[in-house]
């Protein structure tokens, strides 16, 4: 079967993990792996895999528009602001993995269909991918709740320079996305980098403030949502709850990475790259092939 | 660089931990009124974990950040109003901008001691707004001085006016303080500061050692009001420094008045080194965890000391309060297993 070509801009942790995942895809192949540095671990990995590389970043795609039909942007929100209009004019289906908030916010378990009709989709943040579906499930049972809070704890080692340089957008975008996707009145997102050795797995806690929770129904909805996510993020797991105490319901989620480019503790990278590849595959199946 | 010794007053910020973040506007008003004239460089106001930290995770404040800052701003005429921010809790849009609008002139941007690069956005932003800004390396006992210096140099490069070492767990022995401060003073060209906790009974003495080693910022609290065993008690340090003929510019009586007339009334219990604080200092775990550890210990019928030791073993850092329950459950499960095995 003919494969659909994708381009990856950004050769850091996220870009390289995408690259490795795409090698496994039956639908996608990597047409260009482009960044700005000619000497990064990512570039070396791509060369080993026999993938075309470039250090001209977006310019390569401008000069060689036929190299790909779908573009993953794994740079930073600042760079994506520059890249987005160029990719739009080149008519590339763009999957943005930075917290730039340029395109339509996408959580595949919630709004895949709509996102296939947008030209630029944004994968929110790793914390968002892990927690928004759970909040969505909770709101389905208790639409009356007014406040939710999520705490995403990721190991320091799996937070690359991009994540660190974007920590403010990361926090803000996660919070904004929770209210936008679920309709909850107020939300808070807390991001913690954990320096512990050996590195901890990505761990997320979701608190929902409410007085009389229907734990049985919450359990059913949350588990059903978890199952949906596990289809594209195999390492996603509910580790605690939902449990009720002190007028709040607590649910904990852990994400074990697939260990493609980076170790298994980098579940934070895995959840966002899994979601991105899933969207690219769906788009390729429905719109191109 | 100005080498004058300056004092940061974290009473209304660190003290927030001691009362589960339930500091009322009235207290802030009375405190600021009483302390304004005492010669402090800044009064830092807000939730114990800083701007935007009022949460189910670490505790809800009695009143909003904005209300706290407005109340303090109305009373502070001579002393700067300061705020504390941990990236990942607060954001520029939701928290920094509103704080600047409410008259905050000085910010402390704090991170776990090995993660200084996440302060870049916030320090740079605050500088562009023309405000004073300092980087704070929390839980500094968890890294060696070479690592710490590397992080401090990053903070300096972002444009901060100083770096403050925060002994969050009160785990410092005196030599650690002098070695680290001396190393910073030798290699940085911005101010170096120290924020002590009293878990091992060394907050005042470690602060003095920091000064003797070249620190020019001491961050402490009146009456030692703060998380766990509390902080460097500023009025006592001021007294001690005057006895040593070290110029502080502080008005001892005014500090004492704030202590007796306001802070004493804000405290639920006198600031003392409880067994919980001692164990958290020994385990090297953030003292602010004490209340949540006690709750979890009761709920899961385990010894809170065991929780602290295990949290220390797992190198849990501030902001990871959700792990307390995890640890308590693990200990309880292990205990149940041990019992079922005994015959």
Image (cartoon, rainbow, N blue to C red):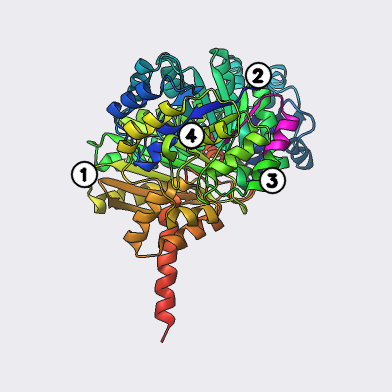
Q: Give the farthest residue toward the bottom.
A: B343
Confirm whether the magenta stretch covers residue B189: yes
Q: Nearer the viewer, mark 2 or mark 4?
A: 4
Q: Residue under label 3, please give it.
A: B144
Chain of the residue under label 2: B
The residue lying at 55 percent from left, 31 percent from top is B242
State how far apart marks 4 and 1 are (Cα). Answer: 43 Å
The residue lying at 62 percent from left, 49 percent from top is B173
Question: Where, quadrant-wise, is the C terminus of chain A in this rendering?
Answer: top right
Q: Residue under label 4, please give it.
A: B234
Categorize mark 4 by other alpha carbons within 10 Å: few (<14), some (14-19), many (20+): many
Is B264 on the left or on the right of A125, as rendered? left
Snapshot quadrant of residue A22: top right
State how far apart marks 3 and 2 are (Cα). Answer: 28 Å
> Which mark, by number, is residue B2?
2
> Which mark, by number, is residue B187?
none
Q: Secondary structure at mark 1?
A: loop
- Residue B47 higher or lower than B74, as above or below: below
State how far apart marks 2 and 4 are (Cα). Answer: 21 Å
State how far apart marks 3 and 4 are (Cα). Answer: 28 Å
* Residue range of the region highlighted in magenta in the rendering: B181-194
Closest to the observer, A132 or B91: B91
Categorize mark 1 by other alpha carbons within 10 Å: few (<14), some (14-19), many (20+): few
Q: Nearer the viewer, mark 3 or mark 2?
A: 2
Closest to the observer, B83 or A95: B83
Is A61 on the left or on the right of B138, as rendered? right
Chain of the residue under label 1: A
Q: Secondary structure at mark 3?
A: loop
Q: Secondary structure at mark 4?
A: helix
N-terminal of the pair, mark 2 or mark 4, is: 2
Are the residues under marks 3 and 2 on the same chain?
Answer: yes
Q: Secondary structure at mark 2?
A: loop
């Amino acid at each position: 079967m003919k494969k659909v070509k994708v381009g990856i801009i950004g050769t850091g942790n996220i870009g390289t993990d995408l690259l490795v995942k795409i090698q496994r895809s039956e639908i996608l192949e990597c047409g260009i792996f482009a960044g700005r540095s000619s000497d990064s671990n990512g570039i070396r990995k791509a060369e080993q895999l026999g993938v075309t590389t470039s250090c001209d970043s977006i310019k390569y795609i401008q000069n060689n528009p036929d190299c790909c039909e779908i573009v993953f942007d794994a740079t930073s929100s600042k760079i994506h602001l520059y890249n987005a209009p160029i990719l739009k004019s080149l008519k590339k289906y763009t999957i943005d993995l930075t917290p730039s908030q340029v395109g339509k916010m996408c959580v595949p378990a919630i709004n895949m269909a709509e996102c296939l009709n947008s030209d630029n989709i944004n994968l929110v943040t790793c914390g968002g991918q892990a927690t928004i579906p759970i909040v969505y499930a909770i709101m389905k049972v208790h639409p009356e709740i007014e406040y939710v809070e999520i705490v995403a704890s990721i190991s320091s080692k799996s937070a690359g320079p991009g994540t660190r340089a974007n920590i403010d957008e990361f926090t803000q975008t996660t919070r904004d996305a929770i209210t936008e996707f679920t309709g909850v009145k107020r939300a808070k997102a807390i991001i913690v980098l954990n320096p512990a050795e050996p590195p901890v797995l990505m761990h997320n806690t979701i608190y929902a403030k409410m007085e009389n929770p229907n734990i049985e129904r919450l359990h059913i909805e949350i588990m059903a949502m978890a199952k949906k996510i596990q289809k594209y993020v195999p390492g996603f797991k509910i580790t605690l709850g939902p449990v009720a105490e002190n007028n709040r319901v607590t649910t904990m989620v852990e994400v074990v990475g697939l260990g493609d480019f980076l170790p298994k503790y980098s579940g934070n990278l895995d959840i966002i790259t899994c979601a991105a590849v899933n969207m690219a595959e769906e788009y390729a199946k429905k719109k191109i092939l | 660089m100005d080498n004058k010794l300056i004092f940061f007053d974290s009473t209304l910020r660190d003290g927030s931990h001691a009362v589960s973040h339930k500091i009322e506007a009235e207290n802030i008003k009375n405190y600021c009124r009483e302390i304004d004239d005492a010669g402090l460089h800044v009064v830092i106001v807000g939730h114990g974990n800083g701007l935007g930290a009022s949460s189910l995770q670490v505790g809800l404040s009695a009143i909003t950040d904005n209300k706290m800052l407005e109340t303090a701003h109305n009373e502070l005429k001579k002393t700067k109003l300061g705020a504390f921010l941990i990236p990942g809790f607060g954001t520029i849009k939701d928290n920094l901008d509103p704080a600047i609008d409410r008259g905050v002139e000085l910010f402390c941007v704090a991170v776990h001691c090995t993660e200084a690069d996440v302060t870049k956005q916030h320090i740079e932003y605050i500088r562009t707004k023309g405000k004073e800004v300092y980087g704070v390396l929390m839980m500094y006992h968890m890294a060696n001085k070479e690592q710490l210096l590397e992080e401090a140099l990053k903070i300096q490069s972002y444009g901060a006016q100083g770096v403050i070492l925060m002994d969050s767990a009160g785990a410092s022995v005196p030599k650690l303080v002098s070695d680290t401060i001396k190393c910073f003073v030798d290699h940085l060209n911005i101010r170096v500061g120290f924020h002590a906790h009293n878990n091992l009974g060394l907050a005042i003495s470690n602060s003095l050692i920091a000064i003797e080693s070249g620190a020019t910022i001491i961050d402490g609290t009146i009456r030692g009001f703060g998380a766990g065993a509390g902080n460097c008690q500023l009025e006592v340090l001021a007294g001690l420094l005057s006895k040593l003929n070290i110029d502080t510019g502080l008005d001892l009586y005014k500090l004492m008045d704030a202590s007796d007339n306001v802070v004493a009334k804000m405290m639920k219990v006198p600031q003392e080194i409880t067994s919980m604080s001692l164990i958290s200092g020994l385990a090297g775990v953030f003292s602010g965890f004490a209340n949540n550890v006690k709750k979890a210990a009761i709920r899961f019928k385990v010894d809170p000391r065991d929780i602290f030791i295990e949290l220390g073993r797992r190198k849990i850092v501030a902001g990871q309060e959700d792990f307390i329950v995890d640890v308590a459950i693990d200990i309880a499960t292990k205990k149940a297993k041990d019992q079922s095995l005994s015959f």
